[in-house]
Amino acid sequence: MKQLTFASRHHQLTNINTWTPDSRWLAFDVRPSGASFTGETIEQVNVETGEVAVIYRATQGAHVGVVTVNPQKAQYVFIHGPENPDDAWRYDFHHRRGVVVENGQATNLDAMDITPPFTPGALRGGSHVHVFSPDGAWLSFTYNDHVLHERDPKLDLRNVGVALPFGPVTPGFQHPREYAGSRWCALVSRTTPSPRPGSDEINRAYEEGWVGHHGYLKADGSLQRRALAFIGDTLSASGEKVPELFIVDLPEDEAVWKQAFPGDDSAMPAPPAGVMQRRLTFTHARRHPGLATTPRHWVRSNPQGSELAFLMKDDNGVVQLWLLSPNGGEPRQLTHGEQGVQSAFNWHPSGEALGFVQQNRIVLCDAQTGNITPLTPVQESEISADAVVFSPDGEKIAWMQETAGFRQLWMTATGC
């Protein structure tokens, strides 16, 4: 084990894509906690030398956080709060944007237009947890809508969206808080405020993950180049919230995306016609229905695109890792026993194992057998459940841990 940061402040890793492609630098922000958005810098630490470098510093009262890295180059993306915040417009789910930094230059990822008629390709609110696709060309994010929030906060449903490699998008700037963006953005999930109990309808889409490094093979043998899996909140027949696993296949054609509905005064933006989410799990009848929400986790695909991993309780109420094909079927329980999974997780780049926290130690789990290999002893101080992240070369794994009263970054070798 090697402690990477030592300053008397907190350091926060995002749950995926925190390493530079050369496996030498680890990007982080300096929020005092995952829920408090008050950090002013995006930074990175060299895991070999301990050198710390500032990637971006916010100005004009803005705050930044939740940084991820392009898997193909030293390009960073993170959440940026509003400049000069005031009582009418301050940081919130629907008041934030993505910012991309490359070679020291910062550009907005998404545009925002909150004045009708709404600009195609622009958002009408805030984007969050921006993650590059494995080829570095597209990005996913979660989204909340300012326009509907102003009308009724209950209509501002979380959704999943994508930022596409064509743009820029420039709104009419009829409101002082509107801005341009470098990418064309569209939602890919469909939500409704009142899902029909027992149906596939959802009122929240979140914790998404890209499927495969090159997509996945569909049941008919054809390749689906791009897809996102995510969690969607359904309602049981009795009206209880049940999080289920969903997937949406994404078309490549730019013309298709330019037909996406930008939203109106009473309706959320929507995906292009034909882009439909598909439900993969059906857990309403289980003893413990639904995917686990504690610990918070994100759906993760193996690099091969053949298995999606997620957390769900077994019949004894213990949170376990489960695997399922993007084509559906019966989930396969990977971990067993009394010791549950205590954190978000990620796949090793080989696709042969997954890493997470169990019994307050970092472990590797064999993706075929479920066998557990501890990488650290049981720790006296608490390991954060937020992020356990492999380096791109697969040789290292990093996490956060309370150290001398502050959350610091740690790393160890994987032996892989």
Image: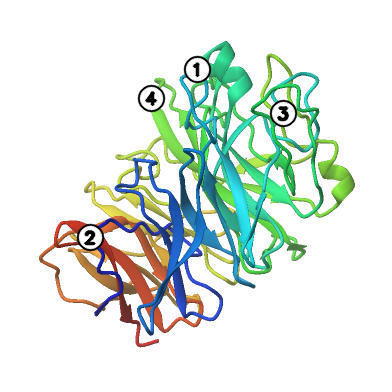
Left or right of 377 in this view: 89: right
The first of marks 4 and 3 along the sequence is: 3
Quickly name the residue at label 2: 8
Taking the spot 80% from the left edge, 37% from the top edge, the residue there is 170
What is the spatial separation of the Cα atoms under label 2 and label 1, in whole angstroms?
40 Å
Foreground: 179 or 274? 179
Residue indicated by mark 4? 240
> In the figure, residue 212 lies in which quadrant?
bottom right
User: What amino acid type should be assigned to the residue bearing mark 4?
Assistant: Glu
Can you identify the residue that label 1 sits on? 154
Label 3, on which residue?
A: 113
Q: Earlier in the sequence, mark 3 or mark 2?
A: 2
Q: Secondary structure at mark 1?
A: helix
- Name the kind of residue labelled 1 in the image: Lys
Total marks placed:
4
Q: Quadrant of the N terminus?
A: bottom left
Q: Residue at x 56, y 59 (%)?
A: 325
